Amino acid sequence: MSSQAQIVKEKLDSAIKLMDREKIDTWLILTRMGYDPSLPFVTDMETEHLTAYFIHKSGEHVAIVSEEECDSFKGSEVYSNIKTYSSHMDDVFVEVFNSYEPKKLALNMSLYDHLYDGLSLGLYQWIEKLIGAEELNGIEVSSEPIVQPLRCVKSPAEIEAVQTAVNHTTDIFEAAFEQMNVGMTEKEIGHLFVEEMKKRGVTNGLGEPYDLPLVCIVRCGLAHRKPADHIVKPGDIVIIDFSLRAESGYVSDIARTCYFLKEDEESPPKDVENAFNAAVEAISASIDALYPGKKGHEVDAVGRSVIESHGYPTIRHSVGHQVGRATHDGGTILGPRKMPPRPQVEGVIQAGEIYAIEPTVIQDDGLPCILVEENVLVTENEPIVLSKRQLELVTTPYAVVKQK
């Protein structure tokens, strides 16, 4: 069985358990042009025409596909019950719908998260027209209570897929650090990562496949911006934030900070070391607090308090977020409580979730800024760090700045 088919099998098994928990008998996914963020969890096939997936609590699932795309489903390792239509799906859809007689129909609709909101208004109105607005209104529910844990709690095959992405990422960081020198621009450093991705047959986890990662010379401004033509000089702190997508479709999200020594330096200045150590301490404390049953804001408060206890400004973003099929994979966020309340930070951490942990030292006016980001798996026992942790500041020996 292919890795994608194995993931889908594991996910469908989980979906049935979640549907039983939520007293939902049928989960319907409708898609055109292959769009719905939940598709990779329920099918190992890709389609462009209107396609319907009926996921049923009995385990008897049905896919309705166009005749033109039916042949591709003959190779599916997941779906054996395939219905086809020629020009219009209407009659086949109603036939399958009536055969299930759903009492509680889950649809991909969400008020808060685009990752669970894959059903378009047009397709919703199409269902409404076919079965009647009154009947639909009486049985429809949001699939979010199914899709959120289904997406966030990783199966064994998914954990392996994320670990592969993480391994590629840390290897690429090591390869890039060996090639980085003063005189390079942010863009040139970014291109080192692109070349290493191409060597390994992987792509960027954000944006286009070979977009540059975030590369920031701190004195030129720390923000989520594209790398520019700023040139690295001795004494510079450089932050690189890199998400990688492996062949499986699963991603990593890891950041590293390095320092370029000045001519008379054998080690970074004390204020740079202090900032780095504060960030690492905050990451360690956040990981130690990452247990099932904790709420997102509780872990955020742990990492945030460490940064503040060292006299640095509070973190301007969340301490952590989930990674998986997406770099920001929805569900619980390790963020601060704000008004109005955010359901994501009130979410409860579950075993099987994978978090990017990134409590950051951010200062203005050219003061040292540090971003280190690690990927961590939540388990029933100890959290497991999937990435090779950065526990020391990467330093690059002094060199004369190249003239551009």
Image (tube, grey):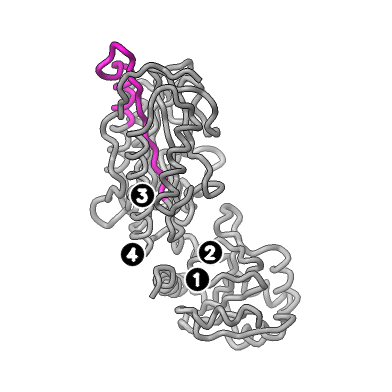
- Asked whether 217 falls inside the magenta stretch, the response is no
Disc 2 + disc 4, Cβ < 8 Å:
no
Disc 4 + disc 3, Cβ < 8 Å:
no
Q: CA distance from mark 2 to mark 3?
A: 25 Å
Q: Position of residue 233 (x, y in %)?
A: 42, 18
For label 3, the residue is 168
Q: Please report the residue visible at 27 percent of the width from the left and 57 percent of the height from the top.
A: 380
User: Which residues, given as a range, are shown in magenta?
Assistant: 252-279
The relative height of residue 369 versus residue 351 in the rendered view (above or below) is above
Q: Which mark is residue 38?
A: 2
Q: Is residue 36 visible?
A: yes
Q: Earlier in the sequence, mark 4 or mark 3?
A: 4
The relative height of residue 366 versus residue 172 in the rendered view (above or below) is above
Q: CA distance from mark 4 to mark 3?
A: 19 Å
Q: Left or right of 180: which side holds 317?
A: right
* Res 72 quadrant in image: bottom right
- Crowding at mark 3 (Cα within 10 Å: few <14, some 14-19, many 20+): many
Judge depth for marks 3 and 1 and give the one in front: 3
For label 1, the residue is 42
- Asked whether 263 falls inside the magenta stretch, the response is yes
Q: Indicate the secondary structure of the residue bearing disc 1.
A: loop
Q: CA distance from mark 1 to mark 2?
A: 7 Å
